[in-house]
Image (tube, grey):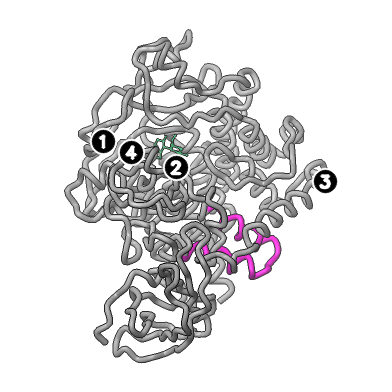
Amino acid sequence: AGQPTVEVIRLNQIGFYPDAAKVAIVVGEPGSNTTAQPFQVLTTSGKKVVFSGTLSPARPNAFSGKLARTADFSALHNPGTFVINIPGLGQSYPFAIRAAVHRDMAVGALKGFYFQRASVALPESYAGRWHRPAGHPDNHIFIHPSAASATRPAGTTISSPRGWYDAGDYNKYIVNSGISMGTLLSLYEDYPDFCNSLITNIPESNNSLPDLLDESLWNLRWMLTMQDPTDGGVYHKLTNAKFDGMVMPDKATKERYVVQKSVTATLDFAAVMAQAARIFRQFPRELPGLADSCQTAAVRAWGWAKQNPNALYVQDDMNKAFDPDVSTGTYGDRNASDEWIWAAGELYLTTRDDAYYTAVNLFPDDKTPLPSWPQVRTLAYYSLARLADQLTPRAQQDAVNVKTRIIQEADKLKQHVDNQAFQTPMGKTASDYIWGSSSVAANQGIALLQAYRLTNDKSYLAAALANLDYLLGRNAVGYSFVTGFGHKTPMHPHHRPSIADGVEAPVPGLLSGGTNANAARQDNCSGYTTTVADEVYLDADCSYASNEIAINWNAPLVYFVAAIEALEAKTA
Ligand code: 9MR
């Protein structure tokens, strides 16, 4: 009793499954922690010792040189609430051991998308303290000069309501919506039964669709409005000319535009609509006609992309040529080869038409890059693996290759984890610590879970769990990166509603971008105290390069946590 809570004990601040590995990392300065050091696990009530162990020998952190020692209490299986005690040092935050220990967070992270909804009020009955008036009706969106066509001249308007705000800003970007939707829809395809049990208390919760699909429909219906009905091309984004100030949605009333159609947005759109068609075809009574509309939209988008393969989105050119110039997020990807693969793969799987399968080289090299907004090809491989029993003979020829490349990618992630200071796949190289690194950890976790599904080899599940521990506190900055979930969580994310709503706690269930080695020079926020790759993180709202939230980061969080919950429920 009387021991202080100390932040040098880094662990998943939510907890652990009874039969899974349980590890905390104790961090220290070089030269410290060299002697044998006992630790105990205590019950929070009564401080009863339920486990005693010794910290591992120290390992130096590859980035900082700081020493890290492991407290392994995997042998403790009993449910309860506990702390780790290190005599003479202090105690950890409390954590739980129990079945379904991450379920609330899975629900909370999915609910995060509800809080991002545009064009609608969030009443208190659904949004609690974070209720807010409607913003951005988006029913008078100007055709920007860069998007002008004969049927839609510059300055005329279209209606393009709904959708999710992209991130801390209020704009809506098709490229980023694309990967976010692909990730969420894949969760449904991979774990439909579990998704039925994820109830987020949204206005649609009482209908017969799972809330995950209802939430996805909010954005899907917006995406459909972003396609020009005349030619099938898709506008790159719906945006203000400049970013809004730090105000609530209803106070952000500047003119909005749809800009140039791009081949990347159009192909991402095609992939999402093709996948959506396959899924919503299962709900003909609830959503009559929707699957057909999605499939038609996908086919038309593909057709436009074939006609306009060089239509990359180039904001710099726009700035010189058009009024108003546009300076919001670019999602400017100069290479569409992976978007072609994703769209071809999803269109093939939905139509079973080999013409899509052979239209592009689906396997241009032996790489299987983790999904990120500019690199979506592996989403096609995941879908091909998922639907392996439904392939035509032509695609069947590659089925083993698809499976093998996913497993090989997961093998790389699984290797050398023991040498890492934090014993996680995340952070084996400094290049993991980029803008939105939390989504790197989540997407690594997803890759490992995909391999687990293909092999039933539990070592993949264990490695994935280590990355979940990373996200929830077992990392060099000691934060659980999910707002509202954990003990030390982001309080000042770069997220306009969280800043402007007058509520101290930020909107919950949102994944902070996380540690970013280059954040200081990317956002010029003052207050960064280090340049060590795994330590550059600032819980300040000016730190948009390390502490923004975004739908393409929340989506893999939702997939990752929900999939782990679904799998643990099966293995328990
Ligand atoms: O996530 C994007 C990151 O990969 C880029 O490096 C960064 C700078 O271009 O932009 C990020 O995306 C932002 C988008 O452009 C606008 N909305 C907020 C997004 C998250 O910061």
| Contact (Cβ within 8 Å) of mark 4 with mark 2 | no
| Mark 2 vs mark 1: in front | 1
Q: What whole-number distance in Å separates the C-alpha atoms at marks 4 and 2? A: 37 Å
In the picture shown, does residue 327 fall above or below 99?
above
Q: What whole-number distance in Å separates the C-alpha atoms at marks 4 and 3? A: 51 Å
- The 10 Å Cα crowd at callout 3, few under 14, some 14 to 19, many 20 or more, is few
Left or right: 104 in relation to 495: right
Residue kind at label 1, given as amino acid type: Gly
| Mark 1 vs mark 4: in front | 4
Q: Is residue 444 magenta?
A: yes
Q: Residue furthest front?
A: 31
Left or right: 330 in relation to 563: left
On the image, numbered disc 1 is attached to which residue? 135
User: Which quadrant of the figure contains the C terminus?
Assistant: bottom right
On the image, numbered disc 2 is attached to which residue? 217
Q: Earlier in the sequence, mark 4 or mark 2?
A: 2
Q: Residue furthest top?
A: 150
